[in-house]
Structure formats: C-alpha cells, structure tokens
Amino acid sequence: MTTKNEEFQKLREQCLECKNCGLCSTRTNVVFGVGVDNAEVMFIGEGPGENEDLQGEPFVGRGGQLLDKMLAAVDLDRHKNIYIANIVKCRPPKNRDPLPEEQEQCIKWLRKQFAVLRPKIIVCLGRIAAAKIIKPDIKIMKEHGMFFEKGGVLMMPILHPAALLRNPNNKPAAFEDFLKLRDKIREICDHTYDDQGTGQ
C-alpha cells in the first residue's frame, strides 16, 4: 500500500510535466506546493508570481514573507504543520489573473492534492481563490474570516497578503482572522499543534 508521501511524490512528478494549458510555455518552474503531507489545514492562493515562478515555491515574495509572519504568530509553519498550494501551478504572464480556462485545467491538480491530504480546514488567500473554491459571489471585504462548510470541510476566505501590503490598514482585521483560525484548529484538528505544545 502506498503512503501519503509516496502518493504526493508521484503527483508532484506528474504535475511538473504538465502541459495542459498555455501557461506551460512561459513558466520557469511549476509551483506544485509546499508543506507537510499530513496537514489538516490547507492554504490556497490563486497562482504564482515572479518570485514563486523563479523559486518553484508558493508565497516566497514580499506577500509570502508577510504570510509567514502571520502564520508564525498563530504557531503555523509551512514546513511543520500546514500545506500551501495555488489554483494554478504556473505563473500567468505579468501576474495577470488566471483565465477561467487556465483555472479549469489546473484545478484538477489541486483536487488531487486535496484528495491525498484530506484537510479539515481550507483557507483561501484572496478573492479569486475564494470565488473558485468557496462560492463565485464571495464578498471578500465583508466575508473574510467567516467559516463556510462544504462537503464536511470548513473553508475560510482571508485577505490576500499582497492586498495587505497595498492596504496596511487591513492588517489588524486579517490578524483577527488568523486568531479565529487558531481557535478553530484547536477545536477540530487532531495533531496540527502537537509539535508546538500549544494544542489542547
């Protein structure tokens, strides 16, 4: 029987070869995702930017550094207890929004990642991810920090780190959302906080 880790490695190898849409012709790297393969909490963004494309890892630019700080404040870490991925795995040219057909082609990989991980909580980073994953008419400024349930999984939209860099006034509200997330993790997750000793 294959382990989650083996399943994930196989999936990664397949994804790195992907040529399902035109974005494959302009990418430097496929940005598959990063994190632990037993994560109970999965963060999903819309797509890689320039830094992510160059390094092959999601959220490594200025927005990613801010995300890491906010994660650290609630004892979450991409290398210890969560998983981070994007709807599209290749950078859209000039960081434009991914087109609907690109999202459709690429979300198959995300669905497979989800099927291996089986997270209890999904956090959507920004409006585009939230509209695709939670509901098309999401009002990110009004509904960020709220939990929605779909298929037994709790989903929360939060403000995108890049948006927080543009509008620092929204940082306190975003931090409140992370505190809500921490409380929910303590309530329903089994091992996310085990390593840090901040669990139940």
Image (spheres, rainbow, N blue to C red):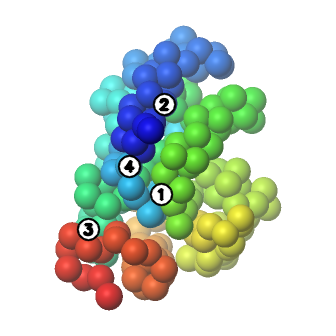
Amino acid at pointer 2 = Leu
**C-alpha distance separating marks 1 and 3:** 15 Å
Q: What element carries label 1?
A: strand
Q: Where is mark 1, residue-wise?
A: 42
Specify whether residue 102 is in view: yes
Q: Report if the CB atoms under discs 3 and 2 are less than 8 Å apart.
A: no
Residue drawn at x 47%, y 45% as measured from the top left: 85
The x and y percentages for residue 98 are 64, 35
Answer left or right for 157 relative to 172.
right
Q: Residue at x 55, y 18 (%)?
A: 18
The residues tagged by marks 4 and 3 sit, at their Cα atoms, a distance apart of 19 Å
Q: Which of marks 1 and 3 is nearer the N terminus?
A: 1
Where does residue 74 sit, x and y in percent of width and height? Answer: 31, 75
Which sits earlier in the primary sequence, circle 3 or circle 2? 2
Q: How far apart are marks 2 and 4 (CA)?
A: 12 Å
**Does 112 sit left or right of 185 as displayed?**
right
Q: Helix or strand or loop: what does disc 3 sit on? A: helix
Q: Distance between the residues labelled 1 and 2?
A: 17 Å
| Image coords of residue 25 (percent x, y) | 54, 11
Report the residue marked by disc 3: 72
- Marks 3 and 2 sit apart, C-alpha to C-alpha, by 28 Å
Label 2: which residue?
11
- Camera-side mark, 1 or 3: 1
Above or below, comparing residue 132 to residue 185 in the picture:
above
Residue sticking out furthest to the right: 137
First in sequence: mark 1 vs mark 4: 4
